[in-house]
Amino acid sequence: MNTINTRKYLLVIFLLTIIIILAGCAHNEVVDECLTGHTYGFFGGLWHGFIAPFDFIGMLFNDEITMYAQNNNGGLYALGFLIGSGGWGFFGGRSVRRVNHSRVTYQSQKFDDAEIVE
């Protein structure tokens, strides 16, 4: 049993090594042109989160529209985007209506007079 587990681990390590080597050969894109100009911060991320559903629809028809700004300042932009898109439910929770739950009781049913049907 121990050799079977060892072979499985070696196979997984071998496959991961091959995947990492092949990923290292991937084509690199030059992103310097994308990172020039205005840097988006928290409020830019908040705005982009609000308009994300409309951006998604636009992305389906136009390749130049993106949902997420490439030229952002990192964590604060991501936090703003998450809050703006409702990822934490800050704005959507207030409009949900409460559901009234009522207790349902079932009367016990007796099967003393049941017939057997063949």
Image: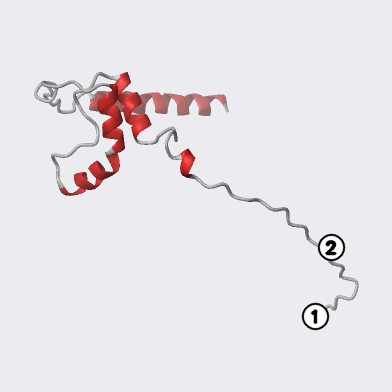
Q: Is 118 situated above or below 108?
A: below
Quarter of the figure with residue 30: top left
Asked whether the beta carbons under mark 2 and mark 1 sit within 8 Å of each other, the answer is no
Q: Which sits in the foreground, 91 or 74?
A: 91
Quarter of the figure with residue 54: top left
Report the amino acid beneath label 1: Val
Mark 2 vs 1, N-terminal side: 2
Q: Which sits in the foreground, 98 or 34?
A: 98
Report the amino acid beneath label 2: Ser
Task: Give the numbered dot on residue 65.
Answer: none
Disc number lying in front (2 or 1): 2
Seen as rendered, the residue at the extreme right is: 112
Which residue is label 1 attached to?
117
Quarter of the figure with residue 74: top left
Q: Real-space Cα distance between discs 2 and 1?
A: 23 Å
Q: Is residue 29 left or right of residue 24?
A: left
Q: Is 59 situated above or below 18?
A: below
Which residue is label 2 attached to?
108
Secondary element at image label 2: loop
Q: Is residue 42 left or right of residue 35?
A: right
Judge the density around disc 1: few (<14), some (14-19), many (≥20) Cα neighbours within 10 Å: few
State which quarter of the image contains the C terminus.
bottom right
Seen as rendered, the residue at the extreme bottom is: 118
Q: Position of residue 36 (x, y in %)?
A: 11, 21
Image colouring: secondary structure
